Image (tube, helix red, strand yellow):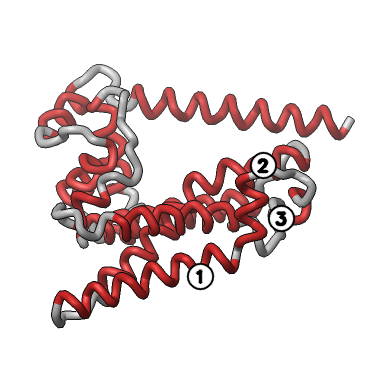
Amino acid sequence: MDIINYRMNLFASLNNELIDIEKSYEFESTADEIRYYKYEKPKFQRYGMFYNKLLKLESNVPMGSQKMKADYYEDAYNHVYATFIENQAYIVYYRMKDTDQDERLFVRNSPNNHIFALIEATSMMEEFLYSIDDDRTIDEKINDYPKIIWTGKLTNLVLLVKGMVLTNSINNGNITTKELVEYIQVMFNVDLKDHYRKYQDVKNSQDPTKFLDYMIELIKDDINDHDEKINQRKK
């Protein structure tokens, strides 16, 4: 259950930041807004929904007999099936890649702009319930969601971890570097057991914040490009 809690807390922190950005962000066009809510955001949002469903499911597993547990998981599957039935029209829209309702469904103020994330999260839940008879632990199963691999330098990842801890960005600061490293290792499929030594290497380098400075430069360029396109449209 620890990894589920870790992922839920990390999702909540990142989601809060995303919501703040969304409030003031100006899309270049309606097409861009639709693309974001229809395709891009669900890729992230589905995991928050899935972890929330999974945490509730596993927190309420009965302590009784195997039959009681089997009945419990069967009820959970029935709930998944009911969710699919309830959203059948949206599922058809999703599978057929329709577009005629996009401007109603996938814009900032639509109460339904999360619907594709819900469909994908429910599908993930269905897949998890199919694996109930799998002998692996919950933490081992949850590692299947998602399969994301850090491909950059490990020292740069350690620097990001340290930054998140120092800025109290995770769990309101109630987390140690070691705890966050343990989670990041699982999340990005990397080995950071020597994270302390790697951080010392960064501190002793000629330009300790080179990676962060590079990130800032790229973000500024991206913001400037966006602002320039907005200004051109206004002319």
State the quadrant of the C terminus.
top right
Mark 3 against mark 2, which lies toward the viewer?
2
Residue to which mark 2 is pinned? 97
Return the residue found at the far top: 206
Q: Which mark is residue 82?
A: 1
Return the residue found at the far bottom: 64
User: Quadrant of residue 126 in the image?
Assistant: bottom left
Q: Which mark is residue 105?
A: 3
In the rendered image, the vertical position of residue 38 relative to residue 49, given as above or below: above
Query: Gap in Å between the C-alphas at discs 1 and 2?
Result: 22 Å
Instruction: Please tell me which residue is depicted at 36% across the width and 24% down the height of the picture.
Output: 211
In what element is the residue under mark 3? helix
Mark 1 against mark 3, which lies toward the viewer?
1
How many other residues sit within 10 Å of disc 3, few (<14), some (14-19) or many (≥20)? Answer: many
Residue 159 locus on image (x, y percent): 27, 34
Instruction: Please tell me which residue is depicted at 41% across the width and 26% down the height of the picture.
Output: 213
In what element is the residue under mark 2? loop
Three-letter amino acid code at the position of disc 1: Ala
| 1 and 2 marks in contact (CB < 8 Å) | no
Could one spot residue 37 in this view of the protein? no
In the rendered image, the vertical position of residue 69 relative to residue 28, given as above or below: below
Three-letter amino acid code at the position of disc 3: Leu
First-in-chain label (3 vs 2): 2
Instruction: Please tell me which residue is depicted at 74% across the width and 36% down the height of the picture.
Output: 28
Residue 29 locus on image (x, y percent): 77, 38
Residue 110 locus on image (x, y percent): 70, 60
| 3 and 2 marks in contact (CB < 8 Å) | no
For residue 105, side relative to residue 205 (left or right): right
Q: Nearer the viewer, residue 61 or 2?
A: 61
Q: Nearer the viewer, residue 180 or 125?
A: 125
User: Quadrant of residue 163 in the image?
Assistant: top left
